Amino acid sequence: MPYDVMPLPFKPHRLDGLSDRLLESHYENNYGGALRRLNAIETRLAGLNWATATVFEINGRKREESVAVGSVILHEIYFDGLGGPGGDPPEGPLAAALARDFGSIAKWRAGFTAMGKAMAGGSGWVLLSWSDRLGRLVNQWTADHAHGLAGGVPVLALDMYEHAYRLDFGAKAGLYVDAFMKNLHWERIEARFRRAAAAMTSEGSATQDDGSAQLRVEELRDRLARGERLRVLDVRLGDDLARSDDRLPDSEWHDPERVDDWGEALPRDMPTVLYCMYGFWVSRDAAAALRRRGVDASSLAGGIAAWRAIGGPTVPLSAAQRQGEAA
């Protein structure tokens, strides 16, 4: 089905420093052209015989689709972010996130505008994007419509292709960037950010949907580096332990299938972190069993595999230890 056009959310003649001629041309010709191109590409793809099409047809049309989709979406975010009085965002989640992730709103603004001005004479986009993976907002440089932060959700887009400023500013792209920043509509940008960050998670220990308490490997590393008193238990299954050659420093192995035997005798004098191979149900179940006995226990998210992945230190596990502890 064809993609519908997004109506302009503002009246072009009311913007400060950006002419209605420029904005109308940008919207009707560049955004509209991308939308029409995308719909034409989708029509062609719908009629493509995938079984007989050449690799050149498939690669070429799918690449053009990716470019057109990116152009349509980024233009819609660009226009959605305009039409306001500019300035700083009002107090709220977005303002707080900008201050947290960039040091201050002023620092975010300085970096964002500098990136735009640095692209003068070239082309591409400057994006303010929310990354669920990174857990923060980032200013992103992108060379064209099809290159973006993997998994990122843009909440503000600055178009640095010449069509966005040439009619008003000629080659003076820096003046265009300043004019763009004077017209930001923070309410709509805030709404886009709220949707993007709806799944924001807290740092450190987290309670999963299954009720299990988990600790990130980075948090364990930092707490150990600070010298905190933590008990670290290796609860890998015997078969997994027998195939391993290392363990976390100062960790002791306990059979996860016999937690009833050793759980009651475990001292309650310090927090306890349990790890298995990959941080799935072995360590989670053992930690839950300890918590039922009054132990402050959590499982290590990702297990020893994640610990190795971040470069966490390990010590050798001897053959005798593997055989004796796995028995």
Image (spheres, grey):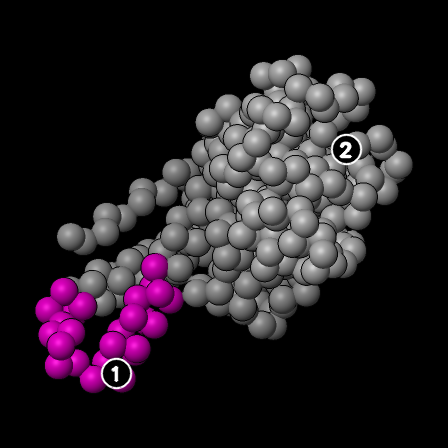
Extreme right residue here?
227
- Residue 143 versus residue 203 in the image, above or below: below
Dividing the picture into quadrants, the one containing residue 25 is bottom left
Q: What amino acid does circle 1 point to?
A: Val
Please, what secondary structure does the residue beneath circle 1 have? helix
Q: Which of marks 2 and 1 is nearer the N terminus?
A: 1
Question: Range of the magenta residues?
Answer: 44-69
Q: Mark 1 points at which residue?
A: 55
Please tell me how crowded label 1 is: few (under 14), some (14-19), or many (20+) other residues with Cα within 10 Å. few
Closest to the observer, 310 or 64: 310
In the depicted structure, whether residue 251 falls above or below residue 311: above
The circle drawn on residue 260 is none
Percent across and percent down for residue 288 are: 56, 25
Residue 121, how many percent across, how many down?
Answer: 60, 72
Residue 292 position by quadrant: top right
The residue carrying mark 2 is 231
Main secondary structure along the magenta-highlighted residues: helix
Residue 176 shows in this picture: no
Q: Which residue is drawn at 10% across and 69% down?
A: 47
Q: Which of 205 and 115 is in front in this view?
A: 205
